[in-house]
Amino acid sequence: MVEPQRRGEPVPEDIGTDDCLTSYTHIYSPDLLKDQVAFITGGGSGIGLRIAEIFMRHGCDTVIASRNLDRLKEAAQKLSAASGRRCIPLCLDVRQPESIAAAVDETLRELGRLDILINNAAGNFLCPADSLSFNGFKTVIEIDTMGTFNTSKVVYEKWFKNHGGNIVNISATLGYRGQGLQVHAGTAKAANDAMTRHLAVEWGPSGVRVNSVAPGPISGTEGFRRLGGLSREADAEFQSIPLQRAGNKTEMAHCTLFLASKASSYVTGSILVADGGSWMTSANDISVLLGFWSSEKKRDK
Ligand code: HXC
Ligand code: NAP
């Protein structure tokens, strides 16, 4: 396929796999997060991994935390090699507050401080509401919404309450127009957007800012693949997006870096939609989504 002529500013470097960039051009000062520490849930893959990398390339040490310790260890090695900063892989399940508490204690023991929390862990799949089990709905709410609250509360009580800090929640635009086959994730992320504002109000006086980035379709990610991204790309559906392309992980990391750093020092309770304008113009066609869903189900059998 011939790439359409692109107008506008150049798109930052990205790689479609869970690897670090082979080249990177700073757009912010390389010292923007110098000697800070960030705790990133789901930092071993996809958008979370690229957030870890871009933060580390700005002088930050990181903890990447999720369930699959082998994958986290591999990611941490790559991240440290690419950036020269420390990255500690820790096992937790955001549905289990005790596992979060143990990981935050370990972070403070090893790195001595905590400046930034990125709530990026999430679970999702396409499923129509009438086929979704009670437990399927509950599972996504528990990971996305309760997981975000659990992690925020543990980090606040153990460090941010007395030292201040920055929380960035990775959201989604699914709920804005009632995206088909996404009642579970759309509901969870809408609740998270409310949580962003509630916690911004309550924790602002302690010097804690709370904001969100809401990505659109981001290439080279599990979320993109699960929601039929590859077939949509093949269909040239991106022409319906104002910016006419998928976003990339580095772009999401730059938005997150803005909200997690002093570049946004008077911003709290805000949701930065980073989707190329997609939510306003993309199709929300139930029959197309059902077709994709049933073909995936047949393939899995
Ligand atoms: C319908 C499903 C399902 C599916 C699981 N379930 N997968 N229902 N369709 N594809 C149901 C199960 O049948 C079960 O219900 C319940 O959900 C729990 O399933 P488990 O497998 O036991 O859960 P668990 O092991 O905790 O795994 C959680 C998970 C899994 C969400 C189901 O997929 C996961 O770990 N995902 C993490 C990675 C991920 O999803 N990445 C994408 C994030 S992207 P029953 O009733 O049978 O017990 C994202 C994108 C946003 O959020 C927007 C993009 C534009
Ligand atoms: P991903 O690579 O699958 O990232 C999700 C991460 O969450 C994984 O690293 C996973 O690691 C972790 N995780 C899942 N359940 C967990 C649990 N119970 N406890 C701890 N960690 C858990 O997918 P992604 O596409 O990059 O998504 C990252 C974020 O962007 C998510 O919040 C997603 O909703 C959001 N988003 C993505 C897109 C997109 O196009 N990709 C669009 C909008 C929003 P383990 O398996 O090791 O636990």
Image (spheres, grey):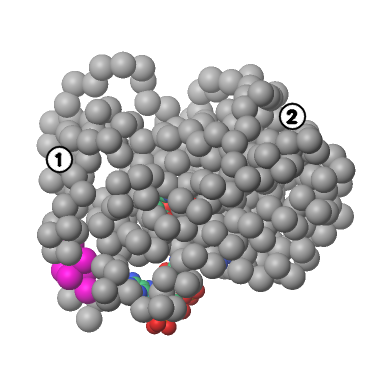
Q: What residue is pinned by disc 2?
A: 34
Visible residue check, residue 64: yes
Q: Magenta: predominant secondary structure element?
A: helix
Going from N to C along the chain, the mark reached first, 2 or 1, is 2
Among the 4 quarters of the image, the one containing residue 9: top left
Query: Judging from the image, what secondary structure is the residue with disc 2 in?
Result: loop
Instruction: List x then y, in percent, for residue 234.
Output: 16, 46
Which label is found at residue 1? none
Vertical side of 209 occupied by 86: above or below: below
Vertical side of 298 occupied by 54: above or below: above
Instruction: List x then y, in percent, for residue 263.
Output: 63, 22
Residue type, mark 1 in image: Ala
Foreground label between 2 and 1: 1
- Is 295 magenta? The answer is yes
Instruction: List x then y, in percent, for residue 94.
Output: 62, 64
Read off the magenta span: 292-297
Q: What residue is pinned by disc 1?
A: 236
Contact (Cβ within 8 Å) of mark 2 with mark 1: no
Residue type, mark 2 in image: Lys
- Is 174 magenta? The answer is no
Vertical side of 128 occupied by 54: above or below: above
Visible residue check, residue 74: no
Q: Is residue 205 left or right of residue 273?
A: right
In the picture, the quarter occupied by the N terminus is top left
Residue ID at (17%, 70%): 294
